[in-house]
Image (cartoon, rainbow, N blue to C red):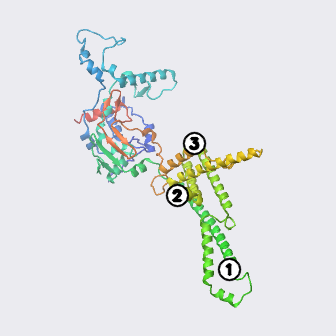
């Protein structure tokens, strides 16, 4: 019987994986290197190091495949400035050898070397010196400073000598970085190599424009790979919360029911008013309420063409008034002054909502704040649609799409600013002539948005338009990066990534430089050295 496959993110026997999983992050935080210095032989040390590092590097591929990929030739590069090559030919490196010439390490003028011409290394050296100086003044050690790491019973000091070394042993698993699934994970297009492998198998990855279903494809320098944008948003975004979705659905359903009930009540009231108005018109046409006669009974049994036309005209007028928002709360048609006052109240409430929105959104645009933006946007649509003749006069061909609402709103506010500024000036002149105190202008009462507030509101609406709510998406909208992503948010130097189109270029093979290696690994150099020695015996 086949043994049960162990858990990939086991907490009992932790293995660090190429993943953003929270359990993997917990295992990474509590990872302890095995103490085999005293209790284990050299073979056991190599075996433990190999087992530990292989869980992270190439955990999804077979051991035999990796052994065939392993290469003892580790790539490295030396930072040599062209000025040094132009001035020296290398003979100064052998000056004094065999003749008894000794170099004093404390000499203020050391021997000539390529380091003196390297701008990047001089910058790194100055940074190390600043970190060392800050360590002497600080109580706590920080990453990058001179710190002491305990591994078994050996104290390894990360001093300047160690920083000047080229960590070739950190390049043990460099051939694995060519694999397509690993490159997708390094480019932050997937949350793990397992998910990147799934993207390849299901046809969501293209290499140089061609569909690539093999996750083990070895990239060559200059290859471009691209992942479907929706897959990347799903892989790197927050998942949906079923409880929160159910709660929002319930709130939306209750809101729709309340709006439907209110609309039904208003429709019934308007229908009753229309019927009452039609009855009054009928009574007037029949002679002002006289008793029934033969002619009246005739009209009762069959309406004449004139009455039918009159009723149709009444119904059409009532319907038009209802559609244009010309009926008041009592169902009677509103006058021009009443409609202007209603529009004034609507705009005043709209601008007050905008001011509240901008005041609350000064620091950060959270999810709740984006919901307010969308609510304000819907209110703006309704307010603009209810402006009637004013909105048509401003822009007869304007629609109520998301992109045009802000333009129409800004146009209306601009017109209000202009009109009421002139009105305020006229009122001020009239008040000065009459020697009376200037009354509060309609502009002050309305509290028109300033230019800065209009720009801020337009920016908030533009941000919401870029990242809207879409319940059909399999991830949480508005899109937000998933949790526990910060420790893994880095891109190696050998990749050039364009996050807008979810594409990346494999520039070159990773190399080791002085003081750093381009293969990301959570293990120290001695662990990778033991693993390198394990696979070295196979060649």
Which residue is identified by label 2?
A: 400
Point out the tag, 1 or 2, that comes first from the N-terminus: 1
Quarter of the image containing the N terminus?
Answer: bottom left
CA separation, marks 1 and 2?
A: 40 Å
Q: Is residue 33 left or right of residue 443?
A: left
Which residue is identified by label 3?
A: 452
For this rendering, which residue is in front, 319 or 437? 437
Q: Is residue 166 above or below residue 447?
A: above
Q: Position of residue 481 (x, y in %)?
A: 46, 45
Q: Is residue 186 visible?
A: no
CA separation, marks 1 and 3?
A: 58 Å
Name the element at disc 3: helix
Q: Quadrant of residue 125?
A: top left
Point out the tag, 2 or 3, that comes first from the N-terminus: 2
View extreme (top): residue: 100
Q: Which mark is residue 282?
A: 1
């Amino acid at each position: 019987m086949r043994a049960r496959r162990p858990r990939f993110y086991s907490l009992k026997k932790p293995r660090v994986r190429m993943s953003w999983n929270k359990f993997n992050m917990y295992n990474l935080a509590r990872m302890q290197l095995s103490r085999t210095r005293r209790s284990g032989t050299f073979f056991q040390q190599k075996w433990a190091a190999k087992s530990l590092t292989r869980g992270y590097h190439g955990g999804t591929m077979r051991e035999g495949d990796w052994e065939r990929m392993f290469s003892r030739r580790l790539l490295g590069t030396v930072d040599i400035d062209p000025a040094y090559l132009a001035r020296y030919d290398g003979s100064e490196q052998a000056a004094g050898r065999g003749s008894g010439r000794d170099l004093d390490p404390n000499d203020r003028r050391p021997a000539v070397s390529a380091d003196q011409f390297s701008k990047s290394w001089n910058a790194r050296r100055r940074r190390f010196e600043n970190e060392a100086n800050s360590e002497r003044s600080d109580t706590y050690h920080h990453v990058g400073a001179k710190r002491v790491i305990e591994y078994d019973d050996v104290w390894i000091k990360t001093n300047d000598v160690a920083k000047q070394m080229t960590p070739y042993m950190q390049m043990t698993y460099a051939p694995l970085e060519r694999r397509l699934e690993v490159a997708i994970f390094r480019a932050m297009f997937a949350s793990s190599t397992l998910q990147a492998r799934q993207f390849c198998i299901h046809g969501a990855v293209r290499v140089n424009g061609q569909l690539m279903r093999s996750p083990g494809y070895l990239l060559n320098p200059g290859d471009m790979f691209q992942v479907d944008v929706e897959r990347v948003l799903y892989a790197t975004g927050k998942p949906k919360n079923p409880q929160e979705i159910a709660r929002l659905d319930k709130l939306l359903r209750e809101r729709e029911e309340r709006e439907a009930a209110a609309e039904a009540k208003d429709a019934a009231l308007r229908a009753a008013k229309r019927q009452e108005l039609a009855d009054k018109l009928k009574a007037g046409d029949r002679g002002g309420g006289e008793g029934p006669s033969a002619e009246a009974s005739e009209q009762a049994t069959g309406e004449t063409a004139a009455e039918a036309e009159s009723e149709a005209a009444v119904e059409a007028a009532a319907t038009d008034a209802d559609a244009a928002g010309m009926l008041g709360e009592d169902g009677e048609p509103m006058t021009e002054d009443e409609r202007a006052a209603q529009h004034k109240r609507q705009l005043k409430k709209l601008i007050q909502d905008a001011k509240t929105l901008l005041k609350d959104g000064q620091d950060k645009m959270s999810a709740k704040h984006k919901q307010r933006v969308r609510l304000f946007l819907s209110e703006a649509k309704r307010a603009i649609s209810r402006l009637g003749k004013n909105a048509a006069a401003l822009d007869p061909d304007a629609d109520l799409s998301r992109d045009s609402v802000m333009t129409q709103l800004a146009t209306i506010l601009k017109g209000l600013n202009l009109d009421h500024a002139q009105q305020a000036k006229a009122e001020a002149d009239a008040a000065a002539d009459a020697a009376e105190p200037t009354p509060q202008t309609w502009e002050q009462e309305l509290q028109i948005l300033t230019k800065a507030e209009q720009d801020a509101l337009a920016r908030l609406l533009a941000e919401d338009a870029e990242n809207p709510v879409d319940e059909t998406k399999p991830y949480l909208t508005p899109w937000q990066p998933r949790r526990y992503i910060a420790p893994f948010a880095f891109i190696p130097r050998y990749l050039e990534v364009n996050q807008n189109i979810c594409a990346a270029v494999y520039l070159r093979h990773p190399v080791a430089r002085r003081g750093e290696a381009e293969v990301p690994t959570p293990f120290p150099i001695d662990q990778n050295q033991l693993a390198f020695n394990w696979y070295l015996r196979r060649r």
